Image: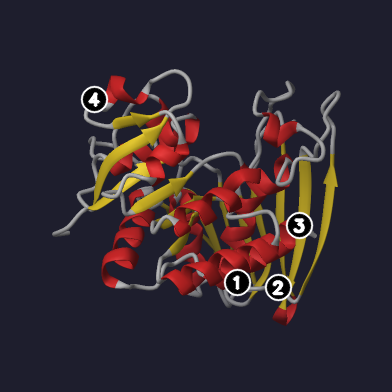
Amino acid sequence: MSKPIVTGLMAYGMSGRIFHAPFLTTNPGFTFKAVVERHEKKAGKKYPDVISYDTVDELLNDDEIELIIVNTPNNTHFDYAVQALNAGKHVFIEKPAAVTVSEVKALYDLGRKLDLKVMVYQNRRYDSGFLSVKEVIESGRLGELMEVHFRLDRYRMAIGAKKFKETAGVPGNGLTYDLGAHLVDNAISIFGRPLSYEKTTAAYRPDSQVDDYFHIHLKYPNQLNVYLTSGLLIAEHTYGFVVHGTLGSFVKMRTDVQEAQLDADMMPTDDGFGIEPEGSDGKLVLMGADGQKTIEWIEAPKGNYNGIFDAVYHTVRENALFPVSEEHVAWQIELLES
């Protein structure tokens, strides 16, 4: 990586601190030049060489910056991404890229017009568990797939402090646009666009103004059924990945450690980063022609959020195809906004 991409970060909240800054400072493909911090200046305590701007305009007016990471509230992604593109910057946008399909189309059209890259951050494609289930599915060892379940649950009774997620009438609010954006992307990245789907949402927390539960049934060719489920009041977490095929089954808990490690100030270059703890293996159950059952324990690959940053580098510097395609993003938002 001979020429790092000079990068600016639009915010240094949880997302900036955990999911972006550690990679911008350890991945040789990037130079983390600046961040917007409207109030308390925290980034400089860990990254003293990074400039802290007071406003987005200052960040966009920095001529040296080539790439802007849009990690602001969901309902602002479209407007800020448009501003960054019009300022001559490539954009890397937190999920969801926008809140409507028409906004998605407008972003990509503007990027093409200005010869700039529009890329969407979907780090859960690089979770250890998802990498593991993807490998098992693509191996063909389960035979013809019949039923797939992806779950991502929390237990959080209190209404969150992030108003854009919790307030009725704010575009892109609720759990469906939050964790749903991950699960829908996981399904689409493996199986593509469904033939049809059914979506159920509900609100169970006291005084909740937004959905805090969803269940989405995606129907695919050859009678494949994919179920995506998430809730904020799930006290006992169950398998995050369940796959049933004509020749066997695979089940696995969600045990990716990257977010927790980053939150504890571990860096992506540290020993042990992304490696699941012992006892986290997935269970592969295969049925032989004689009806004999065999069981294998499948160790997950190392979780690798750096993979999506490598993809950004290759897309910007080498014009490579970004793995989260425009079609994937449009299909995802179509389902989320329906």
Find out whether the residues at labels 1 and 3 contact each other: C-beta distance under 8 Å: no
**Horizontal relation, residue 31 to residue 307: left or right:** left
Q: What residue type is labelled 2?
A: Pro
In the image, residue 53 above or below residue 249: above
Q: How is the image coloured?
A: secondary structure
Which marked residue is nearer to the observer: mark 3 or mark 2? Answer: 3
Closer to the N terminus: mark 2 or mark 4?
Answer: 4
Residue 181: % across, % down: 63, 52
Look at discs 2 and 4 and give the one toward the viewer. Answer: 4
Quarter of the rendering containing residue 337:
bottom right
Q: Is residue 58 above or below residue 251?
A: above
Which mark identifies residue 194? 2
Question: Which numbered disc covers residue 48?
Answer: 4
Asked where in the image residue 55 lies, by quadrant, the reply is top left
Tell me the amino acid under the disc marked 1.
Phe
Q: Name the residue under label 3.
A: 337
Residue at x 58%, y 76% (from the top left corner): 143
Where is mark 1, residue-wise?
Answer: 191
C-alpha separation, residue under disc 1 versus residue under disc 2: 8 Å
Q: Do the residues labelled 3 and 4 touch (CB within 8 Å)?
A: no
> Which of 228 and 136 lies nearest the eye of the viewer?
228
108 horizontally vs 236: left or right? left
Q: Which amino acid does label 4 sit on?
A: Pro
Is mark 1 in CB contact (under 8 Å) with mark 2? yes
Q: Compared with residue 224, is residue 179 higher up or lower down, i.e. above or below?
A: above
Farthest residue to the bottom: give it. 222
